[in-house]
Structure formats: structure tokens, C-alpha cells
Amino acid sequence: MGFFNDLKTSLTKIISDAEQDIRRYKNKDVLDALMASCALIAAADGYVSPEEKRKMVGFVQSSPITKIYDTDEAIKLFNAHADRLQFDFALGKVEILRVVGKQRGNEEIARMIIRTAIIIGSTDGDFSPAEKHATIDLCRELNQDPAAYDLIFPASPAPRAISEPPKPAQIAPSKVTGSFGSLPTRKL
């Protein structure tokens, strides 16, 4: 009987640890931060698409961390943040960053928020520069490195020296052909 008692004790401890881990995430502030970030990314390009809303709901229902939350509560929080952004984007963004900032220092939650933001932003097939910038703002608020999520923009070319004159455009001579025959082009 010693083996079965040890097995029962081990299983009880595993279940207890799992329940404790789940309770650690079942916190309204975590859900609020997640929904706030989803609303920010969805609204960043000026329009919250139905696809973005569906993706957010699907994530809440399927993620092991978020499926412990009530979907209706998640939608209510998302809509509240989206409405705030629609009324005044700048003030809404400040409030969202305040809500998200409560998760600073919790690396696992911070990574989940950033990854979810990227997923929501990419839902329509185009992770726009506005969505990317909003995600970078979330990274900064959460003390996360944007480069770790491939959120870096290519470096812009070095500025010219003021004394350097602009170079003329170089256009190679060519012929345009079509139904009207061959038309020569002028050199510029």
C-alpha cells in the first residue's frame, strides 16, 4: 500500500501546484492588461476589424492561461478599452499603458501580452507600422526588448551633409513598345 499512498500524495501535490499556478494568473488585472493591449493593437491602424475581435475571443477561449477567464468579461473589458480609444485615442492609449504597466516585472505575463498583441495585429494579414509601433510602446511599458520580438524597423539612411548637393536622378534611356509601335523616350 506504500506505493499507492506515495502515488496519491504525489498526484495531490501536482494538482495543488497546478491549481496554485492557475490562481496566480486568474487575476482581473492580468485579464484587463491583456484585453487593453489587444484593444490598442486592434485600434492602432484606425479600425477594429471583426477578424481582430474574433481572434481575441478565440485566444481567450483557447489559451491555457486565459481560458480560465469568463469570455463575456474579456469581451466587456476589450470593448471598454476600444471605446475609450475611439473617443480619444491619445488619452485611451495613456490609460491602456497604465493598465498594462501593472504587469511590469512579471516576465511571463509580459511576454504573453506582447505575443498576443503581435497575433492580433497580424490577424488581417498585415502587421501595419502603426500596429508595430503600438506593440513597441507595450514592450517599453513592460520593460521588454522590442528586438526580441522582431519589432525593429530597418535603419534609415544616414543624412547627407548639408554642403553635399543632391545628385541628379539617373534614368537609363529605353524604348517603350506597344500597339502604337516603338516610341523613343527622352533622356532627362
Image (cartoon, grey):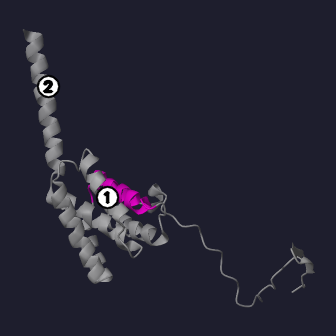
Q: Secondary structure at mark 1?
A: helix
Question: Which of the marked residues, 1 or 2, is nearer the chain's N terminus?
Answer: 2
Numbered circle sitting on residue 54: 1
> Residue at 32% across / 53% down in the picture?
112
Q: CA separation, marks 1 and 2?
A: 37 Å
Task: Report the quarter where the C terminus lies.
Answer: bottom right
Residue nearest the viewer, comparing 25 with 130: 130
Q: Which residue matches tag 2?
A: 11
Q: Position of residue 79 (x, y in %)?
A: 23, 69
Q: Quadrant of the N terminus?
A: top left
The three-letter code of the residue at mark 2 reads Leu
Identity of the amino acid at label 1? Arg
**Taking 106 as reference, is 170 left or right?**
right
Q: Is residue 156 above or below residue 59?
A: below
Crowding at mark 1 (Cα within 10 Å: few <14, some 14-19, many 20+): few
Residue drawn at (32%, 80%), measured in percent from left and top?
A: 89
Q: Is residue 45 visible?
A: yes
Please give the range of residues in magenta: 105-124
Q: Position of residue 138 (x, y in %)?
A: 35, 66
SS assignment for the magenta stretch, majority = helix
User: What residue is shown at x 54% (from left), y 67% (from top)?
Assistant: 153
In the picture provided, is 131 more to the left or to the right than 159? left
Quadrant of residue 178 within the rendered picture: bottom right
* Residue 15 placement: quadrant: top left
Numbered disc 2: secondary structure = helix
Image height of 138 relative to 107, above or below? below
- In this rendering, the answer to whether 167 lies above or below 106 is below
Q: Residue furthest front?
A: 179
Give me the residue at 30% from left, 65% from top: 37
Describe residue 136's horizontal placement relative to residue 161 as left or right.
Answer: left
Magenta segment includes 117: yes
